[in-house]
Amino acid sequence: MPVLSRMITNKAFLGATLAAGKSSHSSALSSQTVPTNSGRSTSGSLPTPRSEEEILSSPHLKAFTLSELKNATRNFRPDHLIGEGGFGYVYKGWIDEHTLGVARAGSGMVVAIKKLKPNGLQGHKEWLCEVNYLGLLHHQNLVKLFGYCLDGEKRLLVYEYLPRGSLENHLFRRTARTLSWAIRIRVAIDAARGLAFLHNSEEQVIYRDFKTSNILLDAEFNAKLSDFGLAKAGPTGDRTHVSTQVMGTQGYAAPEYMATGRLTTKCDIYSYGVVLLELISGRRAVDKTKVGVEQYLVDWARPHLSNRRKLFRIMDTKLEGQYSLSGAFKVAVLALQCIGEDKHRPNMSEVLQALEQLPLQTSRQAPSPSHLQQSPCPSPVSKSPLSHNYHPSPVNMSPRGSPMPPYMKTPLVKFPQGRLAEDRSGGGVGTQKITPV
């Protein structure tokens, strides 16, 4: 039985951006190397492999001293703590925007400083992997890294501060305000852009830990991907996959990866589909407080995704019907494609194209469940309902169940298979028993 080596209940740590200046560090450097990828980043190419010394000598990152970060956080005061997880703790700090030197609390630029636990879930290899990728790949939908600190056994990372925290908190905290449908779609698009950037880099990057707790939001609800500790270089040459130890988070990991250890970008697509389901339903990927099939979001939602009449059963009730029914249905079908059999999943560019053609605003309130039950609609399983000519208002169907209008029959994105694939993956992650180590 496969084992997920890393299960993190990642509390929204709040991220980091680059500023610059090559900086020296006094810490001893090992000869450890990390596989890397070069993407279409602002920093040029990424040689493969890179030694630890090369990674930590990045001209785009500052090597902070422990003393500097103590001063930036007032010696890691408890009232500066903004996040905690299996990896360690995240503190709010202040640095000078131009020199990156320590600034007085309340002045300068706010940053988030991640301090790893000595025996936490994120070890030196994951820490170095994050420095490697975020030190070289720059994109508006990736969290930005200013620098790091390596002092003996102490390892820290300095990120830009993202004040709205994680998508996880906004979806699942009882005290959080409900995210509107428009914001949910915007977040989905931003996250898709980040993944598409990684997947389409000159040397492909597989994120491997896509989940709501790793999607961080700035003040305007722009989303950025964080935590690159599990990122992996994609296959090269004639190789179709990367064979690796199974690592990730229960509920998000693709079933074929869990079963074989074979990693591809389609594993990220599966995880993305799970997050789409969380955005639609307001439910967690795994919820042990529920009973039976409802514990696992993929298993519970799958039967409803291709049936317009059943979709209301899984929609987040906190939305109070304020969403476009046809738009929600298109997102649901897209999610179904993402969690389907790996060879039939769309690629990230196709997912992004589909989402970008959805309207961000609700034209009118979605019909009530009773109306949906009286209005049968053909199943879209044979053909995707995603269309090139999208109409923002919900589809008007007669009580007798008239056929779908033409724009609901034309795929928005013509995936290689040209249809929704019948899922044969055996029920998704929920059918596998996972033990963390």
Image (cartoon, rainbow, N blue to C red):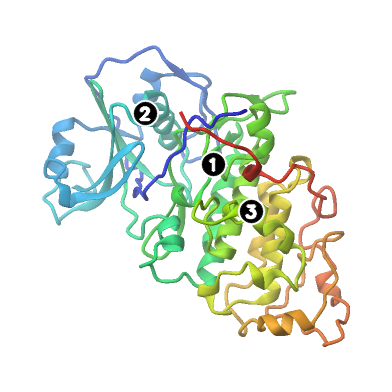
Q: Residue at x 74, y 48 (%)?
A: 340
Outermost bottom residue: 399
Q: CA distance from mark 1 to mark 2?
A: 34 Å
Q: Residue at x 71, y 55 (%)?
A: 336
Crowding around mark 2 (Cα neighbors within 10 Å: few <14, some 14 to 19, many 20+) is many
Q: Is residue 2 above or below residue 330?
A: above
Q: Is residue 321 above or below residue 47?
A: below
Crowding around mark 3 (Cα neighbors within 10 Å: few <14, some 14 to 19, many 20+) is few
Q: Residue at x 59, y 40 (%)?
A: 253
Which element carries disc 2, helix, strand or loop?
A: loop
Where does residue 62 sit, x and y in percent of width and height? 28, 34
Crowding around mark 1 (Cα neighbors within 10 Å: few <14, some 14 to 19, many 20+) is many
* Residue ID for mark 1: 250
Q: Are marks 2 and 3 in contact (CB under 8 Å)?
A: no
* Residue ID for mark 3: 293
Label drawn at residue 58 = 2
